[in-house]
Amino acid sequence: MDKDRIMSNMPEETELYDLAELFKVFGDSTRIRILYVLSEKEECVGNIAQILNMTQSAISHQLRILKQNKLVKIRREGKQIYYSLADEHVRVILAMGKEHIEED
Amino acid sequence: MDKDRIMSNMPEETELYDLAELFKVFGDSTRIRILYVLSEKEECVGNIAQILNMTQSAISHQLRILKQNKLVKIRREGKQIYYSLADEHVRVILAMGKEHIEED
DNA sequence: TTATCATATGAACAATCATTCATATGTTTA
DNA sequence: TAAACATATGAATGATTGTTCATATGATAA
C-alpha cells in the first residue's frame, strides 16, 4: 500500500488549502457569471450588476473574493473601477470544467 | 454596455450550475487529497482512509460525491471496490489550479 | 466645501456542507 | 447457512458562505 511514498508526493498542507480555496471561488455560479462577463472585456461594478440583474452590493462582495484570489485585477478610472480577468489560468480552468461537464 | 450581446455568450443556467457544482467538488481539501492519492494508482476505500488518516465513513461519503460528478470511477474486486481517476480533465484542472496559486 | 455618484463593507440570516456515529448492504469464507 | 469484512448511507451537528440591508469610503462636479 506504501502510504509513505504516496504521502510524500502529496502537496503541503497549506498548498492543499490554497488549492481548495481557489476552486471554492469557482464553485459559485454568480462568480462564474462574473468571470464570463469579464472574459468579453473589462467592466465596472455597476455595469456587471446591471448585466447580471443583481444588486451592486452582491456583485461587489463577490468581486472582492475574486480579487483576493487573484482571478481578477482592477484599473481605476475616475469614480469607476474597471475589473478584468487576471490571467489565462482563469480561462483554461473554466474551459476544462466546461469540457468535463459537456462530455458523454 | 451591450448587455444583450454579453448575455448571449453566457452559458445556459443549467450549465452554469453544473460548472459551479463541478468546481465545488474540487473546493474541499479532503477531496483534493483523495484525488492526489488516486493520481498515483487506483486504491480501495479502506486504503485511502488509512493513507489519509481519516475514518472509512468520511472517505466513503466524499468518494460518493467524486463519483456522482464523474471525477472517479470504480472497479469491483471481491469485497473491495477500487477507485481511480475518471479521466485526464481531473489532472489538468488540478495542475492549472496548482500553477495559479504557485505564481508570483 | 458640499452634494452626488461609484464602490466597499459590516452585521445578520438562511442555506449548504463535511464529519461523526450508528447502522445497513453486500461479498466472501468457514 | 452464519460470521467476518468492506463499503455505503441516514440523521445530527457545527462550521462556512451568499445575499440583503444599511452605511461607510472615496472621487468628482458644482
Image (cartoon, coloured by chain):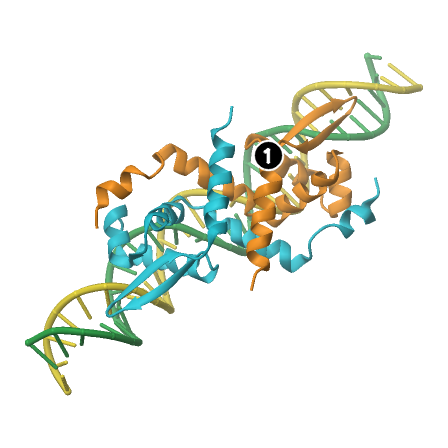
Chain colours: A cyan, B orange, C yellow, D green
Dot 1: element: loop
Seen in the picture, residue A41 relative to C15 is either above or below; the reply is below
Q: State the residue in front, A13 or B58.
A: A13
Seen in the picture, residue B71 relative to C20 is either above or below; the reply is above
The quadrant of the rendering that contains the N terminus of chain A is: top right
Q: Residue at x 70, y 38 (%)?
A: B38
Count of numbered circles in the view: 1
User: Where residue A29 appears, x then y in whole percent?
Assistant: 40, 44
Q: State the residue in front, B32 or A102.
A: A102
Q: In this rendering, would B92 be left or right of A28?
A: right
- Name the chain letter of the residue that bears numbered label 1: B
Which class describes the residues within 10 Å of circle 1: few (<14), some (14-19), or many (20+)? many
Seen in the picture, residue B92 relative to A11 is either above or below; the reply is above
Q: Residue at x 63, y 46 (%)?
A: B32
Q: State the residue in front, A35 or C17.
A: A35
Q: Which image quadrant for residue B81?
A: top right
User: Where residue B49 appears, x then y in whole percent?
Assistant: 74, 41
Q: Residue at x 74, y 40 (%)?
A: B40
Q: State the residue in front, A60 or A85.
A: A85
Q: Which image quadrant for residue C6?
A: bottom left
Q: Tell me which amino acid carries mark 1.
A: Leu
Q: In this rendering, would C7 be left or right of A102?
A: left
Q: In this rendering, would B47 be left or right of B58?
A: right
User: Where residue D7 appears, x then y in whole percent?
Assistant: 70, 30
Residue at image mark 1: B71
User: Where residue D13 appears, x then y in whole percent?
Assistant: 55, 49
